Amino acid sequence: MPNTESAKKRLRQNVKQRLLNRSLKSNMRSTIRSVREAAATGDGEKAQAAFRLAVKKLDRAASKNVIHRNAAARTKSRLSKLVKAAGAKA
């Protein structure tokens, strides 16, 4: 447990920030899942729309250091490959 006032404040800030980070990460994962599901069904248009939203969420998470920027780039690349394949099927 924190003893000093500054340590107590830091603990309060950490709790608040952890909740924000968890929310961002969960939202990002849900969006990624929707892209993968749309690509699996072969719906190219739906997959493309979900992909654009996922890229936005990934970039936001990377800019806030919730995930590493290279992890965001890697995920965007893999999703893009899936969406292109889904578009070619349709």
Image: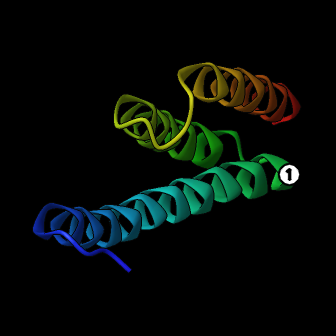
- Among the 4 quarters of the image, the one containing residue 57: top left
Count of all numbered marks drawn on residues in the image: 1
Q: Residue 47's x, y, as percent?
A: 64, 44
Q: Residue 39's x, y, as percent?
A: 78, 46
14 or 28, which lies in front? Answer: 14
Give the residue drawn at x 34%, y 37%.
64
Give the residue drawn at x 76%, y 50%.
36
Say which quadrant the N terminus sits in: bottom left
Q: Secondary structure at mark 1?
A: helix
Residue on which the image places disc 1: 40
Local crowd at mark 1 within 10 Å, few (<14), some, or many (≥20)?
some
Relative to residue 45, is residue 16 depicted above or below? Answer: below
Say which quadrant the C terminus sits in: top right
Of the residues shown, which amino acid type is indicated by label 1? Ala
Residue farthest toward the front in the current orientation of the protein? 3
- Among the 4 quarters of the image, the one containing residue 18: bottom left
Relative to residue 76, is residue 26 depicted above or below? Answer: below
Give the residue drawn at x 88%, y 33%.
89
Residue farthest toward the bottom in the current orientation of the protein? 1
Coloring applied to the structure: rainbow
